[in-house]
Amino acid sequence: MMMIGENNQVNAQNEGGGSSGGSGMSNGSGEERESGMMLKKGPWSAAEDAVLAEYVRAHGEGNWNAVQKNTGLARCGKSCRLRWANHLRPNLKKGAFSPEEERIIIELHAQIGNKWARMATQLPGRTDNEIKNYWNTRVKRRQRQGLPLYPPDVRPLYSDHLYRRYLQPSPLLSSRPTSPTPTSCFSFQTPIMSLHTSTMPSTLHPLHIPHRPPPPPPPQNFLYNRHSAATMRPPPPLHSPNSASIPSSLHSPSGSTPPPPPISPLPSPHNQPAPFQTLPLFEYPTSITTAADYDFFHSNKRFKLDESQSNNSFMLPFSHEQNYSLPSSSSKNLHQPHLDSGFFYPFNGSSGDGLLEDMLQEAQALAAEANGGRNKELPKEMNSATQHDQEEEEYSRLINEDGPTSMGMAINEWPCNDSGESSGRQPSAITDNENQLALDMHGMASFSPADHILPTHAAARSSSVGSWDNFPGIC
DNA sequence: AATTTTTACAACCGCCAATGG
DNA sequence: ACCATTGGCGGTTGTAAAAAT
């Protein structure tokens, strides 16, 4: 915890940080000069807090730059406003979020995305900063654990920012407008590779492929249980029972909440008319250092290096009619999976989907080989009774209680319009024309397969990577 | 017990829109 | 219309504490 003492310490982190909010130059010591006065940066002291609180008590909020002028407080107006809003104003709640608050945050995020300030208006006493921090921590935690970002009964409805992350122009769609605003969308990295579709052509299959486990030791469990994994119920209602606590004004930007898409079997890739062109699945990692890694990328017949691409794309042998370009190839992309909001929907993967079954079997074989026949190595963190465990339990229950007809597949979002309204059909049921329309509508120019597919090597090697046991349908 | 990793938090940064001169 | 200032927002970073190894 950051110490707030009386000594007006200067935080070294601000060295070379440049100007802040239009204030003067940084002097490299955590202070800035404005109007001839050295402005402090870094943690606030109790004395500074007292000065600011007294000023606001006397003059009210606003006109923050006047604080420094009138009180001599060596803080810029921006800093004063932030300090007041986040720490000093009355009725601020401190401490951990209650389960109710967490639920509200999750549901709000599912609806409006990273609109922290708007979320804060729905959580009295909480600041946007707190909410943002909570969410970012949650994202990291669940990513590492390989869990969906949202519980099964919450489905992200927002659409706008889901796509911003990927709106870099591509050779195919370079004329489309792009947004400069990246977000912390979360593309969930489960122990299974998930080929998310939020920015991919809707005719693509969402696909789960167990990823190559990290080089031993320790091996991960990759056994795939087709029977338990082959059950999936339709998505639950959009809102949990307590979602009524969320004001309607915060529902989708369009003002109406789109209904959940009806569930229908998703045809297998084999049901698609051939020939299939290929889709870049992930970038060739630039940091392969082990023979096992090399073998995985070069000997696995399901992946092939697309030599037509300068960025060492690997391809899956089925795909949309077009290839999609990758953003700049970098090991960073590979090792830092992009964050996006994954959720699940049924995938009919058990009725003669030869390709998919082959892939799954292949992955299973790879897993068994890598794992030396051993299963079930639960990371320590998976044994703790936490909220996510409860969510996971519920999720598993939802998955397993229905008939063995479908398999859980993670995707980001249905094809939908700008208001987040779903087309109401499975991606594979979308025609090419419609798919192109969707692309046009969203400017879905490119995506980063590496972001979506591969777990970070670092994460994969860390002890905190969840085993398959932690993923519903995988045993 | 020492070290490493993760978490929680605070604060800063840059951008942008609103406002007023 | 232009420009500077101000305030707000979302993203990012740094750090201490806690947890894990």
Image: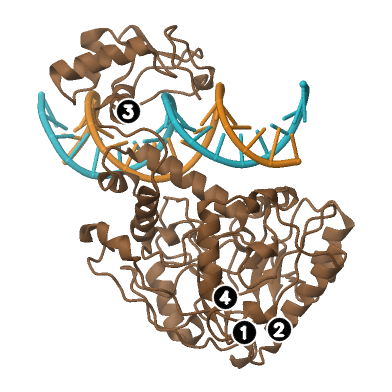
Chain colours: A brown, B cyan, C orange
**Image location of residue A83, percent across then percent down:** 33, 24
Q: Earlier in the sequence, mark 1 or mark 4?
A: 1
Mark on residue A357? 2
- Report which residue position mark 4 lands on: A408
Q: Earlier in the sequence, mark 2 or mark 3?
A: 3
Q: Amino acid at mark 2?
A: Glu
**In this rendering, do the residues under marks 2 and 3 share a single chain?**
yes
Residue at the image point whose x is 47% and y is 82% from the top:
A426
Q: Tell me if residue A366 can be seen.
A: yes
**In this rendering, do the residues under marks 2 and 4 share a single chain?**
yes
Mark 3 or 4, closer to the camera: 4
Picture quadrant where residue A245 is located: bottom left
Chain at tag 3: A
- Report which residue position mark 3 lands on: A82
| Contact check, label 1 and label 2, Cβ < 8 Å | yes
Q: Amino acid at mark 4?
A: Gly
- Report which residue position mark 1 lands on: A349
